[in-house]
């Protein structure tokens, strides 16, 4: 009975979360559907896409459809126009001869406005292999980084935030010393004395304030949410907006030609420092730590689990920074597509990227993991995510929600939390 109540609270809270990337509704709906119900084919099969256009949920006939068929984010295979008849039009693609994804985009014009949608067919995605390679000194490089970090005193500064505390949870703004500069976060912990499992939340891309996961503390977890930019996470949003437009614009490309100065080196080691902090807490049970996040946070979840053997579980949505070299081999590479154009496609940048590519951390993950994404992701291409997932040898489960782009259904959040909390409660 207690378990049912516990998960009812979780579900209610998940549904209350506003997901900024959720799609908006439009007057005209363009629906593109592959002819396999799971959107998945074997290599050499031929996908056929069906296109329907609805207004007020009623099919529109006699309208012209412009379509494009292409592998994700690379060259167009086919394009043309068709007239929609009999409520749907069929578009057959040529055979896909290697593991990957093929996308059909359909666009219509109604009353001077364009409406568009797409669907993505997967071809033997479980057979996708990475294009990036593991540097011979990868482990040595990161072991040295962790050794250097260990020499830096943590010097934690916890500032109670009474305005955010509840009758069941205390909330603190946290400052820690990192390998260079600081790392900041929001700690939420149960008021009731005891020893609790912990959840580390690592952030998606961008710069923003953080508020912490108070409800997790109320559900008897230690919850620590970090920022990655070395600045306090409780400032006015305008501060972060100005930094994103100025000094930290495109931070992910900073010093990409020098592995010791790449922006993400401090970030990855900062995640390890966050684990150091959790381990130091009197309210932590000294046994169970999970890490979770989406997009850049999905990447950091895998990175942290690959770097730090104190992590026991990970849950990642659509991990970014995966198989960054994909574009050099004629297929989609992971966000932020830093090796897509002539400016960044340079040997020293390519080699440096390998020390920060999620694929190479995935090779070292040894703990159970829960993963979820969609075939339609237009930020983190599924080819790149499968390249990382397929090299993981640890216990793992993948929950594909084919039609999702770079967002999640509430059901995905429910499944993730249920899995994570049950693991931590075992």
Image: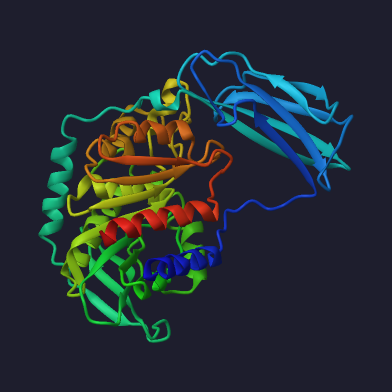
Q: Quadrant of residue 112?
A: top right
Q: Position of residue 37 (x, y in %)?
A: 59, 31
Q: Position of residue 358 (x, y in %)?
A: 32, 40
Rendered residue at 60%/24% (across/down): 70
Q: What residue is drawn where x is 39% and y is 54%?
A: 293
In the picture, the quarter occupied by the C terminus is: bottom left
**Would you identify the image quadrant in which residue 182 lies?**
bottom left
**Left or right: 407 as drawn, with respect to 84:** left
Q: From where the camera sits, is residue 83 visible?
A: yes
Judge whether 375 appears above or below 263 on screen: above
Q: Is residue 10 above or below residue 71?
A: below
Is 29 on the left or on the right of 161, as rendered? right
Q: Nearer the viewer, residue 280 or 184?
A: 280
Q: Is residue 254 visible?
A: no
Q: Residue at x 41, y 74 (%)?
A: 234
Q: On the rendered image, what quadrant is the N terminus found in?
A: bottom left
Q: Is residue 213 left or right of residue 150?
A: right
Q: Position of residue 23 (x, y in %)?
A: 64, 51
| Quadrant of residue 227 within the rendered picture | bottom left
């Amino acid at each position: 009975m207690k378990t049912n109540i516990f998960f009812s609270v979780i579900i209610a809270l998940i549904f209350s979360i506003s997901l900024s990337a959720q799609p908006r509704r439009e007057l005209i709906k363009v629906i593109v559907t592959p002819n396999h119900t799971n959107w998945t084919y074997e290599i050499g099969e031929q996908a056929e896409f069906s296109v329907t256009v609805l207004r007020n949920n009623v099919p529109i006939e006699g309208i012209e459809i412009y379509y494009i068929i292409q592998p994700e984010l690379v060259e167009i295979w086919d394009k043309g126009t068709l007239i929609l008849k009999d409520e749907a039009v069929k578009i057959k693609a040529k055979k896909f001869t290697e593991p990957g994804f093929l996308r059909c985009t359909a666009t219509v014009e109604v009353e001077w406005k364009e409406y568009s949608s797409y669907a993505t067919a997967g071809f033997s995605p479980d057979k996708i292999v990475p294009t990036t390679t593991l540097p011979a000194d990868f482990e040595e490089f990161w072991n040295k980084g962790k050794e250097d970090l260990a020499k830096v005193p943590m010097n934690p500064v916890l500032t109670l935030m009474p305005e955010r505390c509840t009758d069941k949870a205390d909330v603190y703004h946290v400052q820690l010393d990192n390998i260079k500069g600081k790392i900041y976060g929001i700690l939420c912990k149960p008021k009731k004395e005891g020893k609790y499992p912990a959840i580390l939340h690592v952030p998606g891309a961008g710069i923003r304030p953080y508020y912490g996961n108070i409800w997790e503390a109320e559900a008897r977890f230690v919850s620590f949410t970090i920022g990655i930019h070395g600045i306090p996470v409780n400032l006015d949003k305008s501060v972060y907006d100005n930094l994103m437009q100025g000094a930290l614009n495109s931070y992910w490309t900073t010093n990409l030609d020098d592995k010791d100065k790449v922006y993400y080196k401090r970030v990855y080691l900062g995640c390890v420092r966050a684990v150091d902090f959790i381990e130091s807490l009197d309210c932590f049970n000294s046994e169970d730590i999970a890490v979770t996040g989406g997009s850049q946070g999905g990447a950091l979840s895998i990175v942290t689990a690959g770097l730090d053997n104190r992590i026991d579980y990970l849950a990642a949505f659509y991990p970014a920074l995966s198989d960054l070299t994909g574009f050099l081999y004629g297929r989609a590479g992971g966000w932020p597509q830093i090796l897509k154009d002539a400016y960044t496609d340079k040997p020293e940048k390519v080699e440096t990227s390998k020390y920060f590519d999620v694929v190479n951390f995935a090779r070292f993950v040894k703990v159970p993991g829960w993963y979820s994404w969609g075939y339609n992701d237009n930020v983190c291409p599924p080819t790149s995510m499968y390249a990382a997932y397929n090299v993981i040898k640890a216990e793992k489960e993948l929950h594909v929600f084919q039609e999702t782009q770079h967002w999640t259904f509430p059901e995905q959040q429910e499944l993730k939390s249920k899995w994570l909390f049950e693991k931590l409660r075992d």
